[in-house]
Image (cartoon, helix red, strand yellow):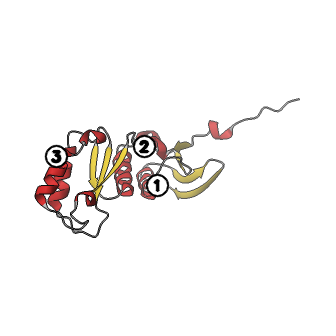
């Protein structure tokens, strides 16, 4: 007599929240302002404006852009504003900071749209492994949002989870 194998995880009320599902699709770009600095240190307005006019902004079409400066130069706020003005109608999102800052902000925005109704009074596991770059802050934001409605919050996989919160 064969015993039927039952997948208890599939039959449970457990909801798996995979943060990869919140990864905004699109190319990521970094614009380093140091490429337009004189001797890598000085920002001169006229040559900077001319260089921006000549730059191929279409490269960033529908992408996510982080603007920063890898040199030790002090960059005035207007320079970042000027670069972003060229990206306003082209890029989906533009920030000042690193690629990691960009990913963090994108996840914060994406997770703020999470519909919590389906998670109400249910055990939720926030999936731990990911092949996409999920910033550590995204796990914090997800657990904080889910904790407001869920019966319990865990981290990992159904077969080996770490309890985070329980009502």
Q: Which residue is mark 2?
A: 22
Q: Secondary structure at mark 2?
A: helix
Per the rendering, the mark at residue 70 is none
- Of all residues, the one furthest to the right in this rendering is 1
Residue at position x 43%, y 54% from top?
138
Q: Is residue 133 visible?
A: yes
Percent position (x, y) of residue 151?
Answer: 51, 50
Q: CA distance from mark 1 to mark 3?
A: 40 Å
Q: Which residue is mark 3?
A: 53
Lower sequence index among marks 1 and 2: 2
> Which of the two marks, 2 or 3, is nearer to us in this view?
3
Instruction: State the residue in front, 27 or 144.
Output: 27
Instruction: State the residue in front, 60 or 125.
Output: 60
- Of all residues, the one furthest to the front in this rendering is 39
Q: CA distance from mark 2 to mark 3?
A: 35 Å
- Of all residues, the one furthest to the top in this rendering is 1
Lower sequence index among marks 2 and 3: 2
Percent position (x, y) of residue 14?
Answer: 57, 43
Lower sequence index among marks 1 and 3: 3
Quadrant in the picture for the N terminus: top right
Q: Which residue is mark 1?
A: 139
Drawn side of residue 72 relative to residue 80, left or right: right
User: Tag count in the figure?
Assistant: 3
Q: Secondary structure at mark 3?
A: helix
Drawn side of residue 60 relative to residue 45, left or right: right
Q: Secondary structure at mark 1?
A: helix
């Amino acid at each position: 007599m064969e015993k039927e194998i039952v997948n208890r995880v599939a039959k449970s009320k457990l909801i798996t929240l995979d943060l990869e599902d919140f990864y905004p699709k699109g190319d990521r770009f970094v614009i380093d302002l140091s490429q337009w600095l004189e001797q890598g240190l000085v920002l001169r307005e006229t040559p900077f404006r001319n260089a921006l006019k000549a730059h191929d902004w279409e490269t960033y079409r529908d992408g996510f852009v982080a603007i920063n400066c890898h040199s030790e130069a002090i960059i005035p706020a207007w320079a970042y504003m000027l670069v972003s003005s060229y990206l306003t109608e082209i890029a989906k999102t533009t920030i000042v900071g690193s690629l990691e800052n960009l990913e963090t902000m994108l996840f914060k925005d994406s997770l703020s749209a999470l519909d919590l109704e389906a998670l109400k009074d249910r055990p939720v596991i926030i999936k731990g492994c990911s092949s996409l770059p999920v910033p550590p802050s995204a796990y914090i934001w997800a657990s904080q949002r889910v904790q407001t409605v869920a019966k319990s919050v865990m981290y990992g996989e159904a077969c080996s989870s770490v309890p985070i919160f329980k009502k």
